[in-house]
Amino acid sequence: MTTPPACTVIVPTYNRVGLLRHTLDSLVRQRLSAGDGFEVIVVDDGSTDTTAELAESYRDRLDLRYLYQEDQGYRVAAARNLGIADARAEVCVLVDSGVVLHSGALAAHLAAHREADGPVAVTGYVFCFNEGNEDGELITKAIDHADPDASIAEFAAQRHWLDLRETYYERYGEDLGVLTAPWLMWWTCNVSANTAQLREVGGFDEWYRAWGAEDVDLGYRLHTAGARFVLRRDAASLHVPHEKSYSGNMAAAAANYRYFAEKFDTPVAHLVPDNHFEEIEDILRSRGLAEGEVTELFGTVFRGGGAAQTEGAAR
């Protein structure tokens, strides 16, 4: 009998063959303990470039499957759900194309799950992520794709291009388990969760058809389902710069945050559209949240992404 992989890495992509190559190269370099293996599922959201051929070229170096869905617009949530449905491992690691993992990143994700008493949602560390491609040229020149571990070590030592969430961690500490809303920082460029729990809560809500909030939505449901959130700095990565529209992304995210608030219709959900993520924890703490108020504040777990998609389509 074939031994199942220790984790499944899911990489959604769309016409980003160059960025995908960097991600797959970093997966080839992963160092895991003896007996641990991993699989990679590349989910193509309708690319017209050479994504399929590139994925095929790595099958001699990775346990890789390539899945394709027709281009019907931005459907990254549906793409990730295809990967989750096809995963063979107990842990899913979600990585965006263009994210370059440290060679020890998958081992760190697995360690977090194995050290926990119950299901956890792990947040990896992401250097170089930017909102409007600021410093894009400088970052591109600074990353050594032949030795990304060295680049990560250099950026950490010099405190260059730190994770955008660094100020959040400095403000509230790194024990995410004591925070009221740790799901606000669970961004799927580099995270992991228990596969069975991902399926139990319904996966990604496929109503989200533009950039932003589909990961926060899933993180919220994982939290209400009992997942403990964990930061693993050693699950480190680099976010390779690419062209993006800050104003376009923010407009899409604003609409998505409004949908999020209406969907869950809880006090904490209604804070999301109008408050900076780093301020929401302060607002919740100012309310003196007690253990008995959790259900009132968050509501019960919302299961079934398909139901949410139906609600969204009716709006």
Image (tube, helix red, strand yellow):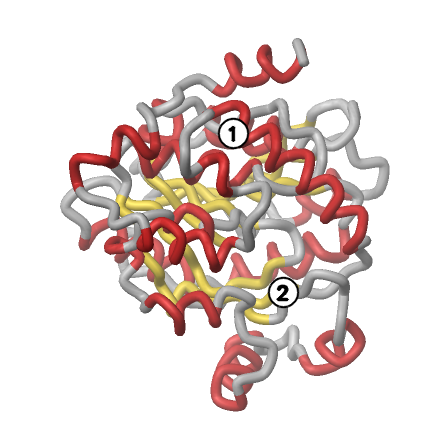
Q: Nearer the viewer, residue 203 or 314?
A: 314
Estimate the x, y position of residue 172 in percent, counting from the top left. 35, 66
| SS under mark 2 | loop
Q: Quadrant of the C terminus?
A: top right
Q: Is residue 243 above or below residue 118?
A: below
Q: Amino acid at mark 2?
A: Phe
Q: For the residues marked 2 and 1, what is the alpha-carbon distance in whole angstroms? A: 22 Å
Q: Is residue 201 above or below residue 251?
A: above
Q: Nearer the viewer, residue 308 or 136?
A: 308
Looking at marks 2 and 1 on the same chain, the residue that comes earlier in the sequence is marked by 2
Q: Nearer the viewer, residue 248 or 13?
A: 248
Q: Residue at x 53, y 90 (%)?
A: 158
Q: What is the residue that sits farthest to the bottom in this orientation?
A: 158
Check disc 2 and report the residue beneath it.
Answer: 129
Check disc 1 and report the residue beneath it.
Answer: 204
Q: Residue at x 26, y 29 (%)?
A: 295
Estimate the x, y position of residue 1 in percent, counting from the top left. 28, 30
Judged left or right of residue 50, residue 213 is: left
Q: For the residue carrying disc 2, how many other residues have a C-alpha within 10 Å: few (<14), some (14-19), or many (20+)?
A: many
Q: For the residue carrying disc 1, how many other residues have a C-alpha within 10 Å: few (<14), some (14-19), or many (20+)?
A: many
